[in-house]
Each structure stands twice: as C-alpha cells, then as structure tokens.
Amino acid sequence: MQTQSITQKLANPTRFMALSGAILPWLSATAAVIIAYAMYRGWNAPPDYQQGETILIMYIHVPFAWLAMMGYALVAFSSFGLLVFRHPLADVSAKAAAPIGAAFTFLALVTGSLWGKPMWGTYWVWDARLTSVLMLFFLYLGLIALRSSIEEETLASKLTAVLALVGVALLPFIKISVEGLSIPWLGLEIPAWNTLHQPSTGMGSTIHISQRIPLLLSAFGFSLAFFAMHMKAMRTEILRRRVKALRIAEVDRARAREAVAAAE
C-alpha cells in the first residue's frame, strides 16, 4: 500500500480542517507567550550605546520586516503550487497569506519610520530599502485588488498566481539594497546600494547577546503568530467556499424544481 506524503494528506480540506483545528489553539497560545516574554526581555535589555532606548523598536520592526518578505514568499510558493501541481489548498493558502503579509509590510514601514525619525531626523526618505518595501506593500495590495475585481474564482486565482510569481523578483532587490550580493563561484559581485538604511542585523548576529536573545525570541514568536493567523484565515476561506458551494447547489436544485413544475 502506497503511503501518502504530508502534502497529499493535507490536500484534503476535511483533513486540514481537523488537523488545523487541533493545532491552532496551541500555536496561538505559544506565539502569545513567546512574544510577551520577548517584549519583557527586550524592555529590560540595556539601551544601545548609539541609539539609546530607541533600540526597543528593533524588537518589533525586524520581525515585521522579515515576515513581510516571508509572507510574500509564501504567496508565491502557494501560487506555484496552484499553477504547476494544482494543489487543492494552494489557492486557499495564497489568498489567506496576502492580507496578512500586507499587514506586516505596513507595520514594518510604520515602525521603520518611527525608528528613522530619531536616527535620520525624518520619518521618510526615498531610500532604496524603504522604497522597495513600499513597492512590496503596493504589490500585496495589487494582488488583493486583482482577486477581488474578478468574480469568477478560478480565473481570479490563476491571474493572481501569475502576478504573484512575477512579483517575487522584487524580493532579491529588497535584500540586495542594503547588503549587496556576492557569489564567488559565479564571479558575481553586486555592491549594496547607496542607502541610509543600516545593514541587516542578521537576526541579531551583529548585536550584543543581551539584545540578540529578545530579538530572536520576538522573531520566532511573531513567526508563529503569522502561521497561526494564516492557518485561521485558511480555515475561514475553506468554510466560505463550502457555504458558497452549498448556496449554488441550493439555487440549482430550486431551478430544477421550477423547471419540473413548469413542465407538468
């Protein structure tokens, strides 16, 4: 007897609903506890020698920025699963992830602006990193708007998936904007752009351990929160589609009854 892979098992919406229903409360509670503990550790960490107490914004801004890009990668991966493998839940995943990713991108922009004011003297500059993340936010909005503008769901899901895969090209530019890119074995060397934005913290590898631990905890906690919200949104979308299918079936039955009555 051939065993099924995890993705094959979860391709069944009924199985996904059962498994996610059991996992979701624990995942949400774990995320809340870790985030709360990370904020406590961050609040009690020593101030930065250059940035002072404004370093506190880092504990939410960095996870938000990380999840903004991870969320879009999830949308693109799910879109690929829809177009190539016709996975039954791929479109549900892509649709559920887009608004959550947009929210985290917006929060990354807001917290980055609040952090930029004391550091740069202004809330906003047309910096390479800020501008590319703003473009990511608009791309999220474009995906949401495109899907909502097309009534036929199958067509909407395919067109949205194509746009999502085209837009994934923006992610490397966001990373390269402050870090550059070096691939020695290809002889490729792309310098970082002229930008005010500081280099990536590498999830804390370049900062003191007293600040690194709460940052890593915060990133982990918010990542769990992202997946909990994504799972909840997928469950809601599955239920919405089931209700829609039931309504269509009821309308079809009513029309059939009317046709029979008219023929008698």
Image (tube, helix red, strand yellow):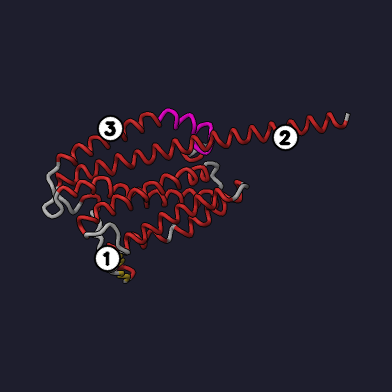
Can you say which quadrant of the picture contains the C terminus?
A: top right
Q: Position of residue 167 (x, y in %)?
A: 46, 58
- Number of other residues with Cα within 10 Å of mark 2, as a class: few under 14, some 14 to 19, many 20 or more: few
Q: Earlier in the sequence, mark 1 or mark 2?
A: 1
Q: CA distance from mark 1 to mark 2?
A: 59 Å
Q: Outermost residue toward the front?
A: 122
2 and 3 marks in contact (CB < 8 Å)? no
Q: CA distance from mark 3 to mark 1?
A: 36 Å
3 and 1 marks in contact (CB < 8 Å)? no
Amino acid type at image mark 3: Val
- Residue at image location 26% in from the left, 60% down from the top: 197
- Residue at image location 53% in from the left, 31% down from the top: 14
Marks counted in the figure total 3
- Quadrant in the picture for residue 113: bottom left
Determine which of the numbered discs, if any, sits on residue 195 in the image. 1
Q: Is residue 132 left or right of residue 233?
A: left
Q: Is residue 264 left or right of residue 27?
A: right
Q: CA distance from mark 2 to mark 3?
A: 48 Å
Q: Position of residue 153 (x, y in %)?
A: 60, 46
Q: Which residues are magenta?
A: 10-23
- Residue at image location 28% in from the left, 53% down from the top: 112
Was residue 159 drawn as part of the magenta stretch in this picture?
no
Question: In the structure shown, which secondary structural element does the residue marked by tag 2 occupy?
Answer: helix
**Looking at the image, can residue 90 be seen?**
yes
Q: Outermost residue toward the right?
A: 264
Front one among 79 and 245: 245
Q: Position of residue 78 (x, y in %)?
A: 48, 48
- Residue at image location 44% in from the left, 35% down from the top: 232
> On the image, numbered disc 2 is attached to which residue?
252
Question: In the structure shown, which secondary structural element does the residue marked by tag 1 occupy?
Answer: loop
> On the image, numbered disc 3 is attached to which residue?
33
Front one among 262 and 93: 262
